[in-house]
Amino acid sequence: MADNKDKNEVNDQTDDMTSDSTIREEESAEHMKEAKKEKGHRHSKTEEELETIENEIIDLKDKHIRLQADFDNYRKRTLKERMELLKTAGESVLMGILPVIDDFDRAMQTLDMVGEDSHIVDGMKLIYSKFQEFLKQNGVKEIEAIGQSFNTDLHEAITTIPAPSKELKGKIVDVVQKGYYLNDKVIRFSKVIIGE
């Protein structure tokens, strides 16, 4: 009977161990399920954070590209403005010289009355040619007018006269005051007489 009692105790202990190990296995399985859920939760949280960071990087790249484009446009615009300013920087000075050019042209026309052998004529022609070269170097050039069709963008009509020939009808017969360009910009219109 003692053997039966010992056997029963051993069986009870074995049953207790079995049930303890079953409980432990169940607890362990639950623990593993929770750990997997937590890991899955952490994994989904990490994916969300990663997606958020990727979106921020895309936004920053976009802002960077836009900033570069804006700066490039600003640089091109200021360069263009600087070039235009350099082209027209001396416009007011050159506009002030135009009446002197007109007087010089009239003086050159009256030199025809003086003898060709005169040193005065040679000196005036030399000065006139240097003056014309100076104007060319600074981008000033005369607007062609005589014999041209009237163009309101270049010419200002003073009056009309009967045309000396049929070819000059509606065209410029005479120039009262020369017009000038400064780098393809009209700085003074030609004052002209048109043939009817």
Image: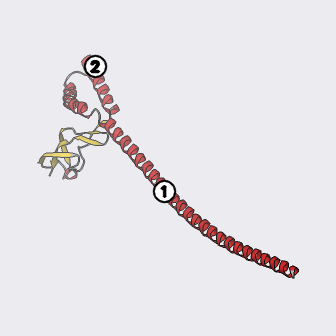
Q: In screen coordinates, is 59 left or right of 39?
A: left
The three-letter amino acid code for the residue at tag 1 is: Glu
Looking at the rendered image, the quarter that the N terminus falls into is: bottom right
Viewer-proximal residue among 65 and 189: 65
Q: CA distance from mark 1 to mark 2?
A: 77 Å
Viewer-proximal residue among 41 and 147: 41
Q: Nearer the viewer, mark 1 or mark 2?
A: 1
Residue under numbered circle 1? 56
Viewer-proximal residue among 132 and 49: 49
On screen, 131 above or below 7? Answer: above
Q: Residue at x 58, y 64 (%)?
A: 42
Q: Residue furthest top?
A: 119
Query: Looking at the picture, how far across and down is residue 4, in whole percent?
Result: 86, 82
Q: In screen coordinates, is 50 left or right of 174?
A: right
Query: Looking at the picture, how far across and down is residue 44, in whole percent?
Result: 56, 66
Mark 2 neighbour class, 10 Å CA radius: few under 14, some 14 to 19, many 20 or more: few
Residue under numbered circle 2? 123
Query: Looking at the picture, how far across and down is residue 90, in whole percent?
Result: 28, 32
On screen, 55 above or below 96? Answer: below
* Element marked by disc 1: helix
